[in-house]
Amino acid sequence: MTRPLLVGNDVVDLADRRCEGKSGHDRFLLRVFSPEEIHRIRSSSDPDVSLWMRWAGKEASYKVVSKRLGRSPPFQHARYVTDVVALISDEPWPVHDRPGESCSPEASTFRGSVRYGDLVIPVRFEVTTESVHAIAWQPAIAEEHLGDRIDWAVDMLGPGDGETWRNLASRFTAREWKAIHSRASAEVRLVARHAAVRRLGYPQGKVEILCPEGDTGRAPPVICVGGVPGHLDVSLSHHGRFIAWALSA
């Protein structure tokens, strides 16, 4: 069997009021980014987008590192140094049999990496006028094989208020519901679980996305089949108006 990829993803809603103008906050930059990254952010034609690409890359890579180590280390953002190498295309990343669609056809895809100690983690970034999405993975594999190994999607969060999202409880098992804390948390699990069912070929009721209890809180989400962890890896993210997931085999 092919060794499964460890995958992490992160989405940023660029319209969130907390994202606007953040590249002008020196204390934030010094806390989160290396001197090299700060220079690249400040010299960018769009400093805010450059900042949030690097932030998303760090978040996605941290999820991969946590899985690789089997625990979640303290998240010191500046230790994850992001390098955005090149623009790949002005079209969304063409992923094999992608069950979702990019929120905007006007997307640019970039290749990059994140350095964490001696580990170099490949990262892909998709940037639209509305959002930034980063996908990180380990181990490194040839780019031409990525479309066969990773499914992903960025979607708009459905309408609803802080109370009615609890009506979604009937669509989850009691074990799944323990880790759900908001409409976004519920919706991203629903679409990711549907993608896992498609890839695995099992009946819907046999597949769960669980977050086991860890030493420092809940561990990263795990796809289980009949209560047993399967061979697929999953990453979930949500921010503002957007939900995003990545699924690897």
Image (cartoon, grey):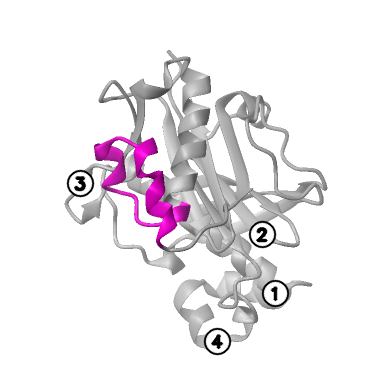
Q: How far apart are marks 4 and 2 (CA)?
A: 23 Å
Is residue 119 left or right of 175 when viewed as pictured? right
Q: Name the residue under label 1.
A: 47
Name above or below for residue 34 compared with residue 57: below
Of pointers 3 and 1, the one earlier in the residue sequence: 1
Q: Which mark is residue 26?
A: 4
User: Which residue is identified by label 3?
Assistant: 213
Residue 248 seen anywhere in this rendered image of the structure = no
Mark 1: give few (<14), some (14-19) or many (20+) Cα within 10 Å: some
Q: Alpha-carbon neighbours of circle 4 within 10 Å: few (<14), some, or many (≥20)?
A: few
Q: In this view, does 78 lie above or below 101?
A: below
* Dot label at residue 131: 2
Q: Which mark is residue 163?
A: none
Q: Quick check: can you spot residue 12? A: yes
* Amino acid carrying mark 2 in the image: Ser
Boundaries of the magenta span: 163-184
The spot of residue 187 in percent (x, y) is 48, 46
